[in-house]
Image (cartoon, grey):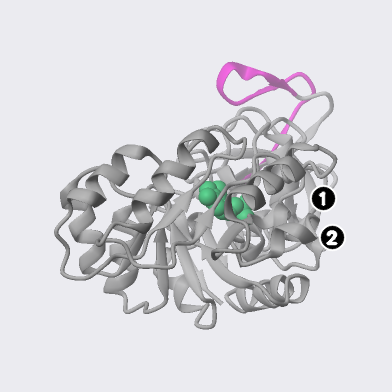
Amino acid sequence: MRSAYVTLDLSAVSHNLARVRAVAPGARIMAVVKANAYGHGLCRIAACLPDVDGFAVARLDEGLALREAGIRQRIVVLQGFADPVELQRLAAQHLEPVVHAPYQVDLLERALLREPIGVWVKLDTGMHRLGLLPEEFGACWRRLVSCPAVRKPIPVMTHLANADAPRDSLTELQLERLEAAVGDRSERSAANSAGVLAFARARRGWIRPGIVLYGVSPFPHRHGCDEGLRPVMTFRSRLIAIKWLAAGDRVGYGGDWICPRPTRLGVAAVGYGDGYPRHARPGTPVLVRGQRVPLIGRVSMDLITLDLTDCPKAEVLDEVVLWGEGLPVEEVARSSATIPYELLCGITQRVEVVET
Ligand SMILES: Cc1ncc(COP(=O)(O)O)c(C=O)c1O
């Protein structure tokens, strides 16, 4: 019998991609599958996306894993390379690194490659994380254009810092800075999921949707279904014990939860050792027989405790849904003072994955 497991509705991936295409019909799509495809399985998700134009991963190893799995589309490695060995390994597998700092231009100028490598240049338009500053961009661009190791044309990308807050003027400013640097001369890419959904101007060239492909809204107070998306991952477990406690009884480590009434307590076989958030607040909803019941007490490594008093039909071995179908991960994230990205990425290795 399974305890904690996830089911993956892979048909939802194609549905969500179709939704992205409908919003940005002319754009080329680079599906973001870093961090094990946000916890859904890197190669599994890439294989569900045969029609996208490319993939984005964070690191070299992720790109190599995709090539090894037979993925033939363009693969962009967002963190680029740090030394000549990494550059050679990227080139050997036709992976396309992002050049985000001047030292990488130096490495390219010194590189001896069998054929020119495709690279993306990242401009820091205001995120102030990776990317060439506008004052560095012109000189680096000219060096790259005349560098024999680099394939032409060279696409330019930037990353939006706050597109999930569409009223923040920073996004328009970032897009203006990108336009100013790129003009009409090159392929470009700006939009993450929030950029795709909220900023028509960000849909030019290549778009880089991540979280929406997994069925989750990038916006703080919305759910995937509000954007016409379907969740791919459903996180499930089972009730393995039920008992009655008296008013005043204390539950779990620290005894923090004190039963305010006679309480029918349910114990589900899932905890932070599986990726359920330890900081989920009491009251965080869990689905039992399709009904929402509140989490009570502290989340422990392998177990959580639920108040089943108002769910009298619940029985031992009933399935519980922690998030996914019928219970948006966005809601659980809010109730745990985190973001859905962290919850999806945080599913641990011992959790069995079942494709549906
Ligand atoms: C450079 C870059 N582009 C695109 C994305 C995709 O973002 P989202 O999952 O919000 O669509 C990410 C994710 O963090 C990223 O780092």
Measure how far apart labels 1 and 2 are at the Cα level.
Answer: 6 Å
Count of numbered labels shown in the rendering: 2
Q: Nearer the viewer, residue 319 or 203?
A: 203
Give the residue displayed 54% in from the left and 83% down from the top. Answer: 51
Q: Which mark is residue 279?
A: none
Q: Position of residue 102 (x, y in %)?
A: 35, 38
Q: Position of residue 19 (x, y in %)?
A: 73, 73
Q: Is mark 1 within 8 Å of ligand 1?
A: no
Which type of secondary structure does the marked residue at label 2 adopt?
A: helix
Please, what is the three-letter code of the amino acid marked with disc 2? Asp
Res. 307 in view? no
Q: Nearer the viewer, residue 83 or 4?
A: 83
Residue 311 lies in magenta, yes or no?
no
Q: Which mark is residue 226?
A: 2
Q: Is residue 219 left or right of residue 206?
A: right
Q: Is residue 50 left or right of residue 289?
A: left
Q: Position of residue 63 (x, y in %)?
A: 34, 62
Please, what is the three-letter code of the amino acid marked with disc 1? Arg
Highlighted magenta segment, given as a residue range: 241-258
Q: Is residue 98 left or right of residue 242?
A: left
How dense is the environment of label 1, judged by Cα within 10 Å: few (below 14), some, or many (20 and up)? some
How dense is the environment of label 2, judged by Cα within 10 Å: few (below 14), some, or many (20 and up)? few
**Farthest bottom residue?**
51
Q: Is residue 246 left or right of residue 47?
A: right
> Which residue is disc 1 drawn over?
222
Residues under numbered marks 1 and 2 in contact, where contact means CB atoms less than 8 Å apart: yes
Q: Quadrant of the C terminus?
A: bottom right
Which type of secondary structure does the marked residue at label 1 adopt?
A: loop
Give the residue displayed 44% in from the left and 62% down from the top. Answer: 154
Give the residue displayed 70% in from the left and 40% down from the top. Answer: 162
